[in-house]
Image (spheres, helix red, strand yellow):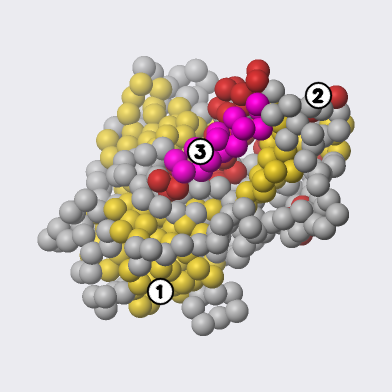
Amino acid sequence: MKTKHSPCELCVLCASVVKRGLLILVLTISFNGISQSLKKGVWQGKLTLSEKENIVLPFNFETKLVGKKNILFIWNAEERIKVDEVTLKKDSINFKMPVFDSEFKTKNYGDSLVGVWINYSRKDKNIIPFKAYFGKTNRFDFVPGKPYSFYEGKWDVTFSPGTEDSSKAIGVFTQGGSVYADGTFLTETGDYRYLSGIQHKGDLYLSCFDGSHAFLFIGRTDGISVTNGDFYSGSHWHEKWTAKRNDTIQLRSPETITKLNPGFESVSFSFKNTEKKTISINDDKYKNKVVIVQLMGSWCPNCMDETNYLSEIYKKYNSKGLEIIGLAYERTNDWDKAVSNVNRLKKRYSVGYEILITGLTGKEKASESLPMLSKISAFPTTLFIDRKGKVQRIHTGFSGPATGAAYEKFKKETEDLLNKLLTEK
């Protein structure tokens, strides 16, 4: 991510239209082989980002019984993430989120759950109070008003306007003639993934929770533009944002942000894989192959989306001469912890390619580890290398499935490039 507010470093951003749907996390709950049921139906969950200012991030989830197991679905748009790392003890229910290093610790009171969400990937302000209420089907505590799609379309967004941290984004929202809204923010380094909410008295309210992100956006309008918006990321970050409608707004190309330094045509590195075997891009396995090098971290939601995509690409093109190497810049110096986090990601997305543990954290260390590249601005950053070992493209960030058209454009451009490189001798 380029700034503190970015999703993955949050990670990297990019945004575009999303169809209404549900981001859904699936939780399988069992205890000593004996199933324990939660009340079945829809719940409203609330994360208290600031008790002093009463800033609350809401989201919905639904519980169902599948066989003898309780299944829980968290709604955020159209994605499903399965969670099966759950422990129960008496009236306590603790569930660890998939991929990301975070978990809920709660107590079940029948019609409510009370506890905390702990984000272990953060070193401070990482414990947020959590409550959930059975039977509350609304996401935000507003009575829906008259349908009016004021926010439908593209918006020219400025985060932290008038400050040295000011940055640009594109907001793309869809309402379909209703007061309900879905969408995301697209930046030069990635996207904010799935956001869902409502238009209330002219203002826009959007939220997202996916195990890493805890995002709350409030956009206040004068009837023409967003004049006084607030963005909260967990309990550790708050900034203002403004926006004006602009259907032609564009950002810099993601292929112009990180470049090869003068005098370099290729990259070189060696790191250990999760089995502590040293792997180098100069190994015979990668010679005369088209290689994708993915700079990433298991903590990064945009990297998660890209890993899911690259895993499918690897299956499709590996037999034609494609190899992929992931370089993991984890948020821990603990080797075993880093391996555990990476292996959870690999298992989740059936990753067949190598992901190496760099033992380094942050974009500055990533830049130092690959001195042949100019500054690394975001995770993920992805290199496309031809059969002769020459870097043909460097792509900063990732436009994930929440961005709709931008995601489809990225996929087409990527496969067009791969087909070209794979046919070259």
**Residue drawn at the location 23% of the way across and 64% of the way down:** 150
- Label 3: how many Cα within 10 Å (few below 14, some 14–19, many 20+): some
Judging by the rendered image, the residue that carries numbered circle 2 is: 285
Q: Element type at marker 3?
A: helix
Does 285 appear above or below 126?
above
Q: Element type at marker 1?
A: strand
- Label 2: how many Cα within 10 Å (few below 14, some 14–19, many 20+): few
User: Where does the N terminus fall, quadrant-wise?
Assistant: bottom right
Nearest the eye: 105 or 218: 218
Nearest the eye: 177 or 374: 374
Magenta stretch in the rendered image: 407-423
Q: Quadrant of residue 141 in the image? A: bottom left
Q: CA distance from mark 3 to mark 2?
A: 26 Å
Identity of the residue furthest to the front in this view: 425
- Label 1: how many Cα within 10 Å (few below 14, some 14–19, many 20+): many
Identity of the residue furthest to the left in this view: 146
275 relative to 168 in the view: left or right = right
Give the prevailing secondary structure in the magenta stretch.
helix
Chain-order first, disc 3 or disc 2: 2
User: Where does the C terminus fall, quadrant-wise?
Assistant: top right
Judging by the rendered image, the residue that carries numbered circle 3 is: 411
Judging by the rendered image, the residue that carries numbered circle 1 is: 242
Q: CA distance from mark 3 to mark 1?
A: 30 Å
Q: Amino acid at mark 1?
A: Thr
Q: Quadrant of residue 318 in the image? A: top right
Q: CA distance from mark 2 to mark 1?
A: 50 Å
198 relative to 73 in the view: left or right = left
Res. 230 visible in picture: no
Chain-order first, disc 3 or disc 1: 1
**Residue drawn at the location 56% of the way across and 57% of the way down:** 253
